[in-house]
Amino acid sequence: MKIVVITAGLSEPSSTRLLADQLAEAAVRELELRGEVTQVEVVELRRLAHALADRLTSGFGSTELEAAIASVRTADALIAVTPVFSASYSGLFKTFFDVLEPETLVGMPVQIAATAGTARHSLVLDHALRPLFAYLRAMVLPTGVFAATEDFGGPGTTALAARVARAGAELADHLAGATRREPARDEFAEPVPFERLLRGI
């Protein structure tokens, strides 16, 4: 099993990376209990910011960016974590998914998560992240994890740990019972020429 973790935190260290690591550890721990060997690869988008801009504007990215894209393409599951900017996912986070080929995430289980300064932004999971991955035809897992600053080391720590554990078990249950996914065929990839349609009338 290979889980790829996409984290869009901008600082080092960042709460976004911290949450991403906790989610990955929870999933690996649960998979080990089910007898599964798991490889985890972390993609830090902060290091790919210039390469992502180049890829959007010129069509060419760096070797590191291409390796990150290839890693996502061959993943069995994705954990995607973003900080909240202006009540949505960050621009850096969205840019990475903009440069992926349209079929990359078809049928892939995705665990979504987000961090922000206050709990006021918790609806970002359902209003922004879930629709994004639904559009990309990924299989968005039911449990999303949101963490506010107060959840790290404060009264919310226990509740956050419980959400992370539940998400890890959910991802492990899905992966342990799943066969290797096959990318879905895009019905619009090879359209019937208009002339052929006219001949049938």
Image (tube, rainbow, N blue to C red):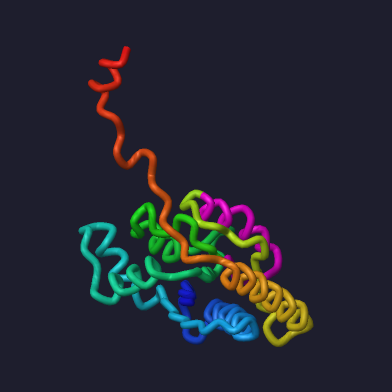
Front in this rendered view, residue 185 or 19: 185
Mark yes or no: residue 61 visible: yes
Q: Establish if 53 lies above or below 11.
A: above
Magenta span of residues: 111-134
Of the pair 109 and 68, the residue shown nearer to us: 109
Q: Indicate the position of residue 68 as horizontal and vertical percent values.
A: 35, 73
Report how many numbered discs are placed on residues in the image.
0
User: Would you say 198 lies left or right of 39 here?
Assistant: left
Q: Choose top left, top right, bottom left or bottom right for residue 195.
A: top left
Q: Position of residue 10 (x, y in %)?
A: 46, 76
The image quarter containing residue 110 is bottom right
Can you say which quadrant of the picture contains the C terminus? top left
- The residue drawn where x is 52% and y is 84% is 37
Figure quadrant of residue 162: bottom right
| Residue 113 is at least partly visible in this image | no
Name which residue lies at 37% across and 66% down: 73
156 falls in the magenta region = no
